[in-house]
Amino acid sequence: MTVHARTPVCVHCGSTAATRISLFGSQLMTSQYRCGQCATYFEHVRWDEAEPAPEPAPTLPSILLDRARREPDAVALRVKRRGIYRDVSWAHYREQVAAVCFGLRALGLEPGDRVAVLGDSCPEWLLAEMGTLAAGGICYGIYPTSSPAQVASLLAHGAASIVVVRDQECADKILGCSEPLATLRRIVVIDPQGMFDCTDARLITFEDVMRLPREPGASLEELVARLDADDPALIVFTSGTTGEPRGAVHSHRTLVAGARDYVACLLPDMSRSWRTVSHLPLNHIFEQFNTVMLPLMGSVIPHFGERRAQATETLFEVAPDFYASVPRYWQKLASHVLVGIENTSFLKRSVYNAAVWVGGRVLQAKPSGHCPLWLRLLEKLAWVVAFRPLLDKVGMRRVRVGISGGGPIPPDVQRLWQLWGVNLKNLYGQTEGGFISVQRGEFPQPGAVGAPAPSATVRLAPDGEIMVRGPGSFVGYWRDESATREMKQDGWVLTGDVGSFAEGNLRIVDRKRDILITQGGKNITPQAIEDKLRASSYVAEAVVFGDGRKYLSALIEIDEETVSQWARSRKLSYGGFSDLAAAPEVEKLIRDVVQAVNSQVSRVEQIKSFRILPRALDPEIEGEPVTPTRKVKRTQMYDRFRDLVESMY
């Protein structure tokens, strides 16, 4: 119940300087008031009803405590252990967070200290993060694919005092650092298997941290009550496509604001529970929203498999009805399906092709809302005989809302999933700008990124750059005020993306810095061409060059899995990736892909020459021209493969 404060007011002069006094008699006590303004005494008083004290803005741990108090027995998440998915209730979730919180404090964690987490998505990451925040600390993640040098750099830049690692492989990246990490005091290992011979005094297991003795009389509620919504909560490091990663600081307030928009736009029906799968690294803000924020704000239950390498198996087992992933995964899963269809019988391929024809006609009819009866009947038949079995095999049959975020998805890939019956939407967000926009409605038109989020304001600069302002935008860069001033001007975050508006929907043209100007003076947006190339199941990555050149060229990384299956089906012998990349048959395969793309673009946008990379791009290799999220560093790509690029000119 909210208590309203009341102020006594003098009935003679109206002053609020009235104070209560007591006059004691032999048998009774009379309460009276004296006005400090007119110096009169009176027995009756007029009360001035003051505004109720505002409720403190919520923090992430306070929302967790509220859920545990309101729904202690409800399922917060499910975790697979020894082949069985086990429910974790909100009450148990809270108790585990409390154990981690007090364990970290026992290790010396003070308010404002940083805790880093290195590893794949797992429930212990959530406990470490929420425990850190409850203790007043700041949490940040490091990609598990980061090289040892990158890990050391991020630990030093964030000045982490404690790091939580998934397993021995992650721990070795820290223990092998050549330079000492001055601020790092403890290394907490979630899965210590294989580390029996490690003697570093900083090592301690996650379970041992949870068993450390608590401070006498301390409670989680008291610690959380001390938090302020404007306290820094997370440092989210950018991918570093143009240089060293920068740490974008988000407070509790910015994260909660973004999460509320996320729920309102994507899952308005919270009367039911939604199943989702956690498989992306949690240091990505996109997965923070999907796995941490959504369950706190609504009835979303994340499921954790036993290992990230078993993500496809987890997807099949869980059969989620809400699924969010990056474009690369949507594309890879679609490629897997298409290769399987190509290698099946003639009859099954014919049935599939007929169903695709029907699905295409249905998608064309949906925007107008006029779908004839005969087409609706064929749609149901296509679903039963082709698309339902296809989606069942990959665990996507029950998906009611599919989200692609973290980068541009090729429109052809989005259209393909929609054709199969998955309501796939395109989402636009940034580490700094937060959740910016998303497509609304059922089966939206591929290509756009939808309308702005409810609390976000989006406008275009004179040069077309997208600018965003809203409560979900970042506070600033960690220990880099000059970069903050450059990125955030008068409250507007400069996204670096060039965009346009059409019928209220935002479209991304390209990264501002990536637009090419050919020798003939034509402006080319390479992203659109690269998206078309990557839409092929045989292309893992494509990078277009041509700035200041007579024509465009491309470096192409083949998809080893799908090209290998293609080669085996044609009984081609090969020893590994390099053999596939050098095979004349594979070169012809990719040439056909390039020619198909050239037929869809204008003459000046056509790829006149291409080269296949001799090896797969690996973000764990030091100096590799891709980030841990596999975003291409265009300048470094040219530097690394200069000879290949120049051979095309």
Image: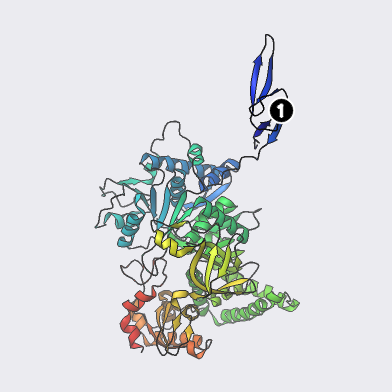
Would you name the residue on which mark 1 appears? 45
Coordinates of residue 24 in the picture (x, y in percent): 65, 13
Frontmost residue, 500 versus 526: 500
Residue placed at 66% from the left, 38% from the top?
A: 50
Frontmost residue, 273 versus 439: 439
Q: Quadrant of residue 539?
A: bottom left
Q: Quadrant of residue 448?
A: bottom right
13 in relation to 400, above or below: above
529 in relation to 298, above or below: below
Coordinates of residue 353 in the picture (x, y in percent): 59, 81
**Crowd class of label 1 (few under 14; some 14 to 19; many from 20; radius 10 Å):** some
Q: Quadrant of residue 217?
A: top left
Horizontal arrangement in the rendering, residue 89 relative to residue 517 (left or right): right
Coordinates of residue 276 in the picture (x, y in percent): 55, 58
- Which residue is situated farthest in the top direction here? 26
2 in relation to 420, above or below: above
Coordinates of residue 192 in the picture (x, y in percent): 34, 50
Residue placed at 34% from the left, 74% from the top?
A: 636
Q: Quadrant of the N terminus?
A: top right
